[in-house]
Image (cartoon, helix red, strand yellow):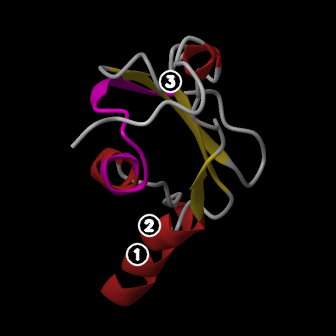
């Protein structure tokens, strides 16, 4: 009889990705430097997170993470691409040899 109660409780629990797993993905997969992490409204079968970054030069608007399988943190991917400022290269003179 106690086994039935335990099984009923287990079936009602919903799997979700833990915050530390998302932070680990961000630290290993980007140069964001998490300042704040919030869970966004989930869509069916997906979990989404938004991170405010300390490194605003690469991610000025933060970072979004999408998890397709909430029970498996390996399904999480970083959706936001890092920003590069190619305009800065225009300021450098071309074909200049730097003396050694």
Q: Which mark is residue 39?
A: none
Which residue lies under the disc numbered 1?
A: 5
Label 2: few (<14), some (14–19) or many (≥20) C-alpha neighbours in 10 Å: few
Q: Which residues are magenta?
A: 26-39
Where does the C terminus fall, quadrant-wise?
top left
Which residue lies under the disc numbered 2?
A: 9
Label 1: few (<14), some (14–19) or many (≥20) C-alpha neighbours in 10 Å: few
Quarter holding residue 52: top left
From the viewer's perspective, is 62 left or right of 36?
Answer: right
Q: Nearer the viewer, mark 1 or mark 2?
A: 2
Quarter holding residue 28: bottom left
Q: CA distance from mark 3 to mark 2?
A: 41 Å
Q: Nearer the viewer, mark 3 or mark 2?
A: 3
Q: Would you say residue 22 sits in the magenta stretch? A: no
Q: Residue at x 60, y 27 (%)?
A: 94
Q: Residue at x 37, y 22 (%)?
A: 53
**Residue pushed farthest left?**
100
Q: Examine the rendered structure and indicate whether residue 95 appears above or below residue 44.
A: above
**Residue 46 in the image, given as x and y percentages of width and height:** 70, 50
Q: Sequence-wise, which precedes: disc 3 or disc 2?
A: 2
Check contact, mark 1 vs mark 2: CB within 8 A.
yes
Check contact, mark 1 vs mark 3: CB within 8 A.
no
Instruction: Please tell me which residue lies in front, 96 or 89.
Output: 96
Q: Residue at x 59, y 55 (%)?
A: 77
Label 3: few (<14), some (14–19) or many (≥20) C-alpha neighbours in 10 Å: many
Q: CA distance from mark 1 to mark 3?
A: 47 Å
């Amino acid at each position: 009889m106690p086994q039935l109660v335990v099984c009923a409780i287990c079936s009602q629990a919903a799997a979700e990705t833990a915050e530390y797993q998302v932070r680990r993905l961000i630290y290993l997969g980007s140069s964001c430097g998490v300042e704040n992490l919030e869970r966004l409204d989930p869509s069916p079968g997906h979990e989404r997170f938004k991170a405010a970054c300390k490194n605003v030069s690469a991610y000025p608007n933060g970072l979004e993470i999408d998890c397709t399988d909430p029970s498996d943190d390996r399904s999480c991917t970083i959706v936001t691409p890092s920003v590069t400022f190619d305009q800065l290269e225009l300021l450098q003179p071309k074909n200049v040899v730097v003396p050694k």
